[in-house]
Amino acid sequence: MNARAHRIKVREVVSETADAVSLIFDIPTDLGRRFAYSPGQYLTVQVPSDRTGSVARCYSLSSSPHCDERPTVTVKRTAGGYASNWLCDNVSPGDILTVLEPAGNFVPRTWNHDLLLFAAGSGITPIMSILKSALTLGRGNIVLLYANRDRDSIIFAAALRELVRRNPRRLTVTHWLESERGLPSSRAIATWARPHRHHDIYLCGPAGFASAVKQGLGQLRVHARDIRQEEYRSLSDNPFEHHAPVAVEPAPTAPVVPSATTATVRVEIDGENHTLPWPRGKKLLDVLLDHGIDAPYVCRESACGTCVCTVAQGRTRMIQNESLIEEELAAGLTLACQTLPESDEVSIVFDQ
């Protein structure tokens, strides 16, 4: 079992719509620091399965750490989606779920800017966390376009109305209902967004909606790199079922010497230092897990940013990168799940 997995009690289950529920968690005092989260992050939940033992699914936190007492995830049923239907049908107050600590990097870096927010369906969940936090911490204006199938499928409809009522000069919410207007086109999005195109932009929703938003913003000469997007995907690896290696290699009694096929990596993590051989074709996260080191991870596909670390010395390269922006790369950050050694000796620090 992943050491960052914890058994957490569900305090309350709130029916948001006919197809969506919010799960409010009771975090024990001794886990308070581990479950401290940032707006826009998510929790990974273990769902029991008769076929595979369990499946892991990521659900965004819809609560704000700055104005809500307890962390809350909101789950919407998806057609044929085993995990979402199981959670909506089976979880009751008092139940215990196994949950990984908060992760993800769909997080604003400043609260001082105006925000342009796009959400569709359950994509409202991280956007809601960001929106509430911005109203609490910042002074900028916030504009939200929220697309849904019809009026009954609007998650947080009452909460959004109340937020607008309390913040009429700062918050504007536009609902786009497919039942009334059809699917939003890129041209319509461009027309609506034009007055707000210089805001900080955050986007979360299904692929078709996200594509229309990006095309519409492109018509306004908004560059793709200026759009922060949260993408949902199935995990190819179940982080709850990574087993400890059968035999953990003992600490070497002699120095680890680089070779043509192996580099040397010094890793600082959780207050401990390790010096390990690093095969040049093997990803850093796999090396750490093979040596019994509990490195943080969820997706192993570069999307979540959970395994971010700093290259303190030496050179590395990433096979792919969907999480880190140019400024973070320039600061020496890398993703352990995608990183290979380039120099003979590398020093890595997990300090995020």
Image (tube, rainbow, N blue to C red):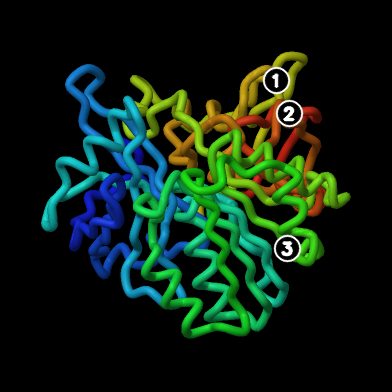
Residue 345 falls left or right of residue 240: right
Q: Verify CB contact (< 8 Å) between mark 2 and mark 1.
A: yes
> Mark 2 belongs to which amino acid?
Pro
> Mark 1 belongs to which amino acid?
Arg
Residue 274 falls left or right of residue 112: left
Which callout, 2 or 3, points at the residue further toward the start of the chain? 3
In the picture, the quarter occupied by the N terminus is top left
Residue 70 locus on image (x, y percent)? 32, 68
Residue 124 locus on image (x, y percent)? 48, 54
Residue 136 falls left or right of residue 45: right
Which callout, 2 or 1, points at the residue further toward the start of the chain? 1
Determine the CA span between mark 2 and mark 1. 6 Å
- Which residue is the site of mark 3? 200
- Which residue is the site of mark 1? 280
Residue at (21, 26) in percent of width and height: 49
Task: Tell me if mark 2 has few (under 14), some (14-19) or many (20+) residues whose alpha carbon lies within 10 angstroms of its own.
Answer: many
Quadrant of residue 51 within the rendered picture: top left
Task: Tell me if mark 1 has few (under 14), some (14-19) or many (20+) residues whose alpha carbon lies within 10 angstroms of its own.
Answer: some
Quadrant of residue 30 within the rendered picture: bottom left
Which callout, 1 or 3, points at the residue further toward the start of the chain? 3
Q: Nearer the viewer, residue 109 or 210?
A: 210
- Which residue is the site of mark 2? 341
Residue 143 locus on image (x, y percent)? 64, 67
> Mark 3 belongs to which amino acid?
Asp
